[in-house]
Image (cartoon, rainbow, N blue to C red):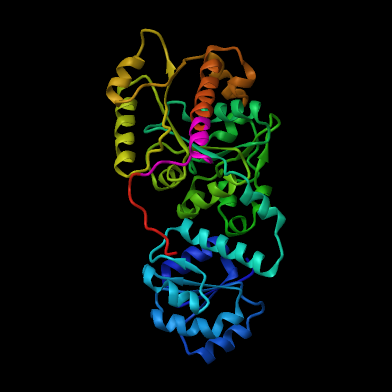
Amino acid sequence: MSRVVLIGADTLLEHQARILLGDEVVTLAPASSDVLVTRLIWLDRRPELIVFGPMMPTQLSLTLARTLRDLADVLALVSDDPEIVPAASAAGITEYLGHDPELEHVDALFDAARERVARVRGVADSRRADQTRRTPGRIVVVASPKGGVGKTTVAVNLAVGLAEAEPSQVVIVDLDLQFGDVATLLGIPPRHSTVDALSKAAARDEFVLGTFLHEHADGFFVLPAPESPSAADRIDPKRVGHLLRQLAARFRHVIVDTSPGLGEVALAAIEQASALVTVVGPDATSVRGARKSLETLRELHLLPASSPVVMNNVEPRSGMSPVDAAAVIGVPVDVVVPRSRAVLRGGNLGIPVLLSTPRDAASRALREVGRRLDENLSRRESRDGGRAVPRRNAPTKEKVS
């Protein structure tokens, strides 16, 4: 979008708009019609969208809309009152945004405005049109309550397995921003990282985002973690959802490796997840942590309907059994991955076990994780007629229409 003008925006709306569009956003304080007309005329480009923000009295917004509607392609109003729609429509307002919106709602507003501009001008952006027709891909988050259980190993081999069936349709994102090891386990140099992909430039332009992806020789793409742990301090978790949606618009499978626990970045990723893979080890602390983690996600209404549990590094007659683990967690253990020297050897060489030793018992189990996920999500997509999105139990704020 070439230009968005916010009139009477609060701090939240301005911040979210700049996350998505950066310097393409212009903010104006409430003023008389004459003053605003002058300011809009003197902009270097005609605005595509004018948003009357929450700091504007509704009636003033409607009055200004009648005057300014010829100076922009699309007008939008921040309001939670559905009764205002007839008067707003008469004033030329076609798009609406609720008060205190989430970043994804602001993103959706910009998308709707962009599509309306294309229709009004009769100019189709073919690249974006292709993406809007394409069913969004699956976002699979791989998480663990504690470190050291092989979470990244599961995530990397899941990406490898899915790419075998659908080459060039898989991307793995390392959101363990301080100590992520996806690049290490894949033996690739992290020329660019998740920090680059979360920049304003990448948020605005999918071509820019694409330049930050590393193409692996085995048919999938990689977005590594930054090399410096301090880079994580520069990340705004609110940008994570937008990044994952961008990638899901391009790839069939978006695999997300998170840091252990339920930090802000991990929760932001889980909120977008079509499926959540919880990885535990054969020890009591890991299993109890998984129970607490899943209970917390249920309470927050963030647990996707597809949430398999994978028990990794299991040895016969050593540690907690899968049956005992399931009793503690409260849900079945879906896949058991045996302890394997081939996994350790492959990790040290930067070659996932599915590639280095495909017939190993651990390889067969890790491949089963991908098979079950694909089967479960395909069944849900067939039933729902589209992407297998997470089921949320909490009520959501409805958009004024």
Tell me if 295 is positioned left or right of 385 in this view.
left
Q: Quadrant of the C terminus?
A: bottom left
**218 or 318, which lies in front?**
218
Can you say whether 286 is above or below 11 in the image?
above
**377 or 187, which lies in front?**
377
Residue 206 shown in magenta: no
Q: Residue furthest top?
A: 317
**148 or 336, which lies in front?**
336
Regarding residue 364, the answer to whether it shows in the image is yes
* Residue 163: percent from left, percent from top: 63, 30
Q: Quadrant of residue 136?
A: top right
State how many labels appear: 0
Regarding residue 320, the answer to whether it shows in the image is no
* Residue 33: percent from left, percent from top: 51, 89
Tell me if 81 is positioned left or right of 361 in this view.
left
Residue 383 shown in magenta: yes
Q: Which residues are magenta?
A: 378-392
* Residue 253: percent from left, percent from top: 58, 36
Q: Residue at x 51, y 14 (%)?
A: 340
Q: Quadrant of the N terminus?
A: bottom right
Q: Residue furthest bottom?
A: 34
**350 or 4, which lies in front?**
4
Q: Residue at x 52, y 40 (%)?
A: 385
Q: Quadrant of residue 309?
A: top left
* Residue 316: percent from left, percent from top: 40, 8
